Image (tube, helix red, strand yellow):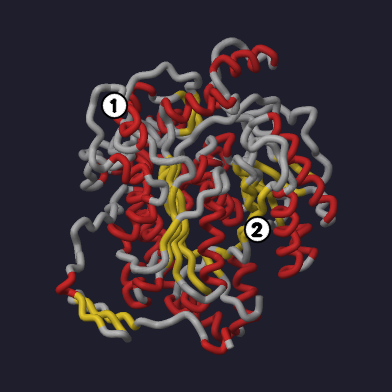
């Protein structure tokens, strides 16, 4: 590790079932009852302003009353709840359909992110990408686009996309339904279906990046696959600034038909049966559909977007970035031989075990045993509760962790497919910064077949018993795609910086980052008031052939960029 750059996270944003993910606003909703009154008011205002529901003529006293009067309304229209069928049908679906399940975790109220900027028949997931990426830039507290220009647009990386595909009337659903419905497909639908479109939109309309781009699909592990791409790009020195993320919006007939046919979904019929067996009455409780590690029978779909801004430790210190933490590694393993493509395998044992070993190697046994927690994949299916609990319990015992705190954010956010790992990242950051872990609040007890040795399942939101600086994040993707990583706190990251750069340089950086912290605090107020304008630079600085001056050594543009053409290869490496 001594000779490799440290991949630091300097900002995070997105649109989720809580609202904005930036500035810890989303995590406030996850642990709402544990938050202070001022934090609650900030959160309520952030959601209501984002959804354009606050009257313009209110004075401060009237605003405070409005927020308090609408508190229950906000809480009922965030996180897991009943699907807004008519809104989705009228806005995003190509045809009507009686859904087999009506629980989901969708964006707050009837939020359509494509109305927040000059979109042109954009799928919802791409609208979430534009608004969410702008949210992430504000969270850094930096003029990041200027930093990108100075660092070099050709050196910035971006890995983002979805796991399934963009599937609303403006993309996949509209494309496939057009002919049966006697309609014509549009020229945009097939291109908007492509899963890497969020990265393409960020490059083309937000950052203007000319660097490496792509998207690594790994089913439900997609976010951590993209995180791995960014982390490795920084560690091998090919880039010092990388954006990683995902955006998934699949609340519609195609996904529900498919997942219900697989038997993987918590349908209304199955939920009614489970509630009867549990003595919970006949009226469906849509908030409690997803039940990780409890008596359960299927997953619940959600929609979410999330984008992390990563920098090398060198660039972060040079620019005075507010380092929120770091990711030293992402371990990815396939399941190998298995009976069925959906069945469990050995891969997740390797990815979890190697990540535990990573933390023990870098920080020692004490940090691993005393200062770590675990965000499980936790889909809410019977098979997952057995296999993943066995993995966690096995390695907790093997590494001497007496009582590892465990939770799963899907109980509140649903299964957001490709964005599931991004949900884990912002929740991990929130847990470490607040020292409070969101709990699995949808189950009264663990199922009898769940492994519990050396594990402490949080079945309610609660504070950690002692300081935690490491949060493991685990993803088990359909088909045998497993990925595990660990979020490292800012305190532990600073310890690494001091060992590498010395206390003097770290002190200089600490002074330099004060401006980013001030700007970030100001940007939080903008986020609360929904005054962060989405960045969508359509038809701006578009280069034509006559704008380029090209030699074998550099490329100059009429907009002022002068980029050297360099080889990444060293002749000695091949001699």
Rendered position, 329 above or below 335: below
Which quadrant is the N terminus positioned in?
A: bottom right
Q: Secondary structure at mark 2?
A: strand
The crowd level at tag 2 (other Cα within 10 Å; few <14, some 14-19, many 20+) is many
Q: Residue 295: percent from the left, percent from the top?
A: 70, 25
Q: Residue 345: percent from the left, percent from the top?
A: 72, 43
Quadrant for residue 207, please give it: bottom left
Residue farthest along the front direction in this orientation: 575
Q: In terms of depth relative to the viewer, which is nearer, 361 or 532?
A: 361
> Which residue position is annotated with label 1?
179
| Residue at figure coordinates x 54%, y 41% from the top left | 30
Q: Residue 290: percent from the left, percent from the top?
A: 59, 29
- Disc 2 to disc 1, how far (Cα)? 43 Å
Q: Secondary structure at mark 1?
A: loop
| Mark closer to the chain start, 2 or 1 | 1
Rendered position, 556 above or below 129: below
| Residue at figure coordinates x 24%, y 81% from the top left | 550
Q: Left or right: 14 with respect to 286?
A: left
**Residue 289 seen by the camera:** no
Specify the label residue 27 is tagged with.
none
Q: Left or right: 357 with respect to 565?
A: right
| Residue at figure coordinates x 64%, y 55% from the top left | 332
Residue farthest along the left direction in this orientation: 546
Q: In terms of depth relative to the viewer, which is nearer, 2 or 495?
A: 2
> Which residue position is annotated with label 2?
331
Rendered position, 420 above or below 8: above
| Residue at figure coordinates x 77%, y 34% from the top left | 450
**Residue 32 seen by the camera:** yes
Q: Residue 325: percent from the left, percent from the top?
A: 56, 64
The crowd level at tag 1 (other Cα within 10 Å; few <14, some 14-19, many 20+) is few
> Tags 2 and 1 in contact by the CB under 8 Å rule?
no
């Amino acid at each position: 590790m001594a000779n490799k750059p440290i991949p630091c996270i300097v900002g995070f944003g997105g649109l989720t079932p809580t609202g904005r993910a930036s500035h810890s606003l989303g995590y406030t909703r996850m642990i709402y009852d544990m938050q202070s009154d001022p934090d609650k008011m900030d959160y309520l205002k952030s959601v209501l302003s984002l959804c354009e529901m606050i009257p313009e003529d209110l004075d401060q006293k009237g605003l405070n009353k409005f927020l308090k009067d609408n508190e229950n309304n906000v809480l009922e229209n965030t996180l897991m709840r009943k699907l807004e069928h008519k809104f989705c049908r009228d806005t995003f679906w190509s045809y009507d359909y009686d859904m087999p399940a009506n629980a989901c975790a969708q964006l707050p109220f009837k939020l359509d992110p494509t109305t927040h900027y000059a979109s042109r028949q954009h799928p919802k997931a791409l609208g979430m990408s534009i608004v969410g990426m702008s949210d992430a830039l504000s969270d850094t507290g930096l003029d990041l686009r200027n930093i990108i220009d100075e660092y070099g647009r050709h050196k910035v990386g971006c890995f983002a996309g979805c796991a399934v595909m963009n599937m609303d009337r403006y993309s996949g659903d509209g494309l496939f339904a057009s002919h049966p419905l006697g309609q014509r497909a549009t020229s945009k639908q097939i291109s908007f279906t492509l899963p890497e479109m969020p990265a393409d939109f960020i490059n083309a309309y937000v950052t203007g990046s000319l660097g490496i781009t792509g998207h690594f699909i790994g089913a439900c592990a997609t976010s951590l696959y993209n995180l791995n791409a960014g982390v490795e790009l920084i560690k091998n020195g090919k880039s010092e600034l990388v954006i990683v993320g995902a955006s998934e919006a699949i609340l519609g007939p195609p996904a529900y038909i498919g997942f219900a046919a697989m038997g993987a979904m918590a349908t209304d019929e199955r939920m009614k049966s489970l509630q009867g067996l549990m003595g919970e009455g006949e009226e469906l409780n849509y908030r409690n559909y997803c039940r990780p590690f409890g008596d359960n029978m299927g997953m619940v779909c959600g929609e979410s977007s999330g984008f992390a801004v990563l920098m090398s430790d060198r660039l972060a210190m040079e620019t005075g970035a507010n380092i929120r933490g770091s990711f030293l590694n992402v371990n990815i393993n396939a399941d190998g031989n298995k009976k069925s493509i959906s069945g469990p395998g050995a891969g997740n044992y390797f990815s979890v075990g190697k990540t535990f070993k990573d933390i023990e190697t870098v920080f020692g046994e004490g940090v691993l045993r005393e200062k770590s927690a675990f965000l499980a994949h936790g889909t809410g299916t019977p098979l997952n509760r057995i296999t993943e609990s066995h993995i966690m319990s096995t390695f907790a015992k093997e590494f001497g962790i007496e009582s590892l705190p465990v939770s799963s954010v899907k109980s509140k956010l649903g299964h957001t497919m490709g964005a599931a790992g991004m949900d884990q990242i912002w929740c991990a950051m929130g847990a470490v910064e607040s020292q409070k872990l969101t709990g699995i609040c949808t189950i009264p007890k663990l199922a009898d077949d769940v492994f519990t040795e050396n594990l402490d399942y949080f079945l309610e939101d609660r504070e950690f018993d002692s300081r935690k600086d490491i949060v493991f994040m685990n993803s088990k993707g359909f088909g045998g795609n497993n990925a595990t990583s660990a979020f490292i706190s800012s305190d532990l990251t600073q310890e690494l910086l001091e060992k590498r750069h010395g206390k003097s340089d770290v002190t200089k950086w600490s002074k330099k980052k004060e401006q980013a912290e001030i700007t970030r605090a100001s940007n939080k107020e903008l986020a609360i008031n929904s005054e962060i304008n989405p960045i969508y630079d359509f038809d701006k600085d578009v280069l034509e052939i006559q704008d380029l001056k090209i030699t074998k050594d550099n490329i100059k543009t009429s907009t002022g960029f002068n980029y050297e053409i360099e080889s990444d290869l060293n002749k000695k490496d091949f001699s």
